[in-house]
Amino acid sequence: MGNPAGVRRDFKALERRRLEAAWLLTQGVSEAEVARRVGVHRQSVNRWAKQLSVQGREGLKAAPRAGRKPKLDNEKLERLQEDLKKGPEAFGYGTGLWTVERVAEVIRSRLGVEYHPGHVWRLLGKLGWSCQRPVGRALERDEAKIRRWKRVRWPQLKKKPRPKARRSSLSTSPD
């Protein structure tokens, strides 16, 4: 069946379920009945029974972790976080905007780890950084003039609905 996308597995709960199945198997309960009680497929119970006979209960213990080990440990992640807080200008970039390409370059140069820019966003999400867009407003913006223009000039320019014309005496529709 597998794991639904985006749902984290509870490895301790999975281990408890396997150990419960092992206890039932040692009590002489059939594999089909164990599968019903534990809520898994019979084939899983069969696989666990084989592991139990070969490796004992140790064979049913939880694995330390799933997947590839991360390239950056907690210490390096903290260093990256500190570097990001300094801002891109501290690393020679002309603007104050972090891009995934820039962050990937900082990770490579400062931490010695190669990351594809397409995967940097996951790392930033783990650190609590989110996508931000700069506000597109001019620095010379005069709020008082804008309010006056909206209140006075805009209504003058805005199209107004034409007044309703009288009906023609030559109307073809019956009244």
Image (cartoon, grey):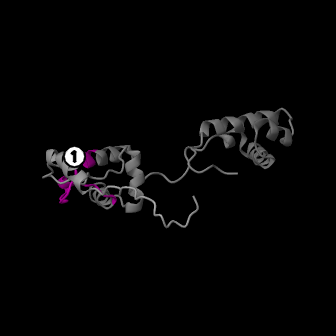
Number of marks: 1
Residue plotted at (59% across, 43% down): 9
Structural crowding at the residue carrying mark 1, measured as other residues with C-alpha within 10 Å and reported as few (<14), some (14–19) or many (≥20): few
Amino acid residing under circle 1? Arg
Give x and y (percent) for residue 97.
25, 55
Q: Residue 121, how many percent across, how many down? A: 39, 54
Foreground residue among 69 and 91: 91
Q: Secondary structure at mark 1?
A: helix
Please tell me which residue is depicted at 40% across the width and 48% down the height of the picture: 125
Q: Is residue 12 left or right of residue 38?
A: left
Q: Which residues are magenta?
A: 82-100
**Residue located 85% across and 38% down the image:** 33
Relative side of 66 to 138, left or right? right
The quadrant of the picture occupied by the C terminus is bottom right
Report the front residue among 112 and 158.
Answer: 158
Residue at point 47%, 64% (across, down): 169
Is 3 in the magenta?
Answer: no
User: Residue reaching furthest front?
Assistant: 169
Give the residue number, with chain letter if any, for mark 1: 151
152 shown above or below 105: above
Give the side of residue 175 with respect to residue 95, left or right. right
| Residue 20 rendering spot, x and y as whole percentages | 73, 34
Q: Is residue 95 magenta?
A: yes
Seen from the viewer's position, the closer of residues 121 and 36 is 121
- Residue 120: percent from left, percent from top: 38, 56
